[in-house]
Amino acid sequence: MKMKNFFLPVFFLGALFLSSCTSASFELTSDGLNHSAPFDVEKLEKSIKTSLVNYNWSITDINDGLITAQYSKSNGVIVADIKVEYDSEGYSITYVDSKNLDANLKRMTIHKNYNRWIANLNKTISMNYMVM
């Protein structure tokens, strides 16, 4: 009987540890491009749009200097919403909302895949801007 009582807490601690391994710290806003300003705004907008589409983000709205986009996986089970603001000084990507990414804005943690998605997006925007 004592062994049975031992395994239950160990099981829950193990489950807690495994679930915490998928979270990582993040910043609400990620600044992009390590190039010197001023930027060609039309070229930057095109680079952002192309990069979003390349990584399967759906562009949900476009206004002057602002693009909102959504990334969805597993038929909408996992969702991330961002906004990309840009001008002649550069651009920034800001977290807006998510579903099933375990976002905790008090702790500033989110599923580690979100950081990878944003890093890939930043890298691709920069590369696209240089070659356009």
Image (cartoon, rainbow, N blue to C red):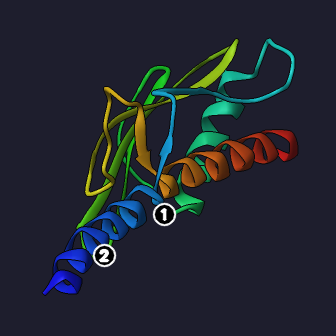
The relative height of residue 25 versus residue 27 in the rendered view (above or below) is: below
Q: Quadrant of the N terminus?
A: bottom left
Closer mark to the observer between disc 2 and disc 1: 2
Picture quadrant where residue 132 is located: top right
**Helix, strand or loop at mark 2:** loop
Residue at point 32%, 69% (across, down):
15
Query: How far across and how far down the image is residue 97, in percent?
Result: 28, 39
Q: Nearer the viewer, residue 12 or 41?
A: 12
Few, some or many residues within 10 Å of mark 2 (<14, 14–19, 20+) = few
**Which residue is label 2 attached to?**
74
20 sits left or right of 112 in the view? left
Residue 104's mark? none
Q: Nearer the viewer, residue 80 or 109?
A: 109
**Which residue is label 1 attached to?**
56
Residue at point 81%, 13% (across, down):
37
Query: How far across and how far down the image is residue 6, in percent?
Result: 24, 76
Identify the residue at the far left of this view. 1
Residue at point 86%, 40% (across, down):
130
Residue at point 75%, 22% (across, down):
40
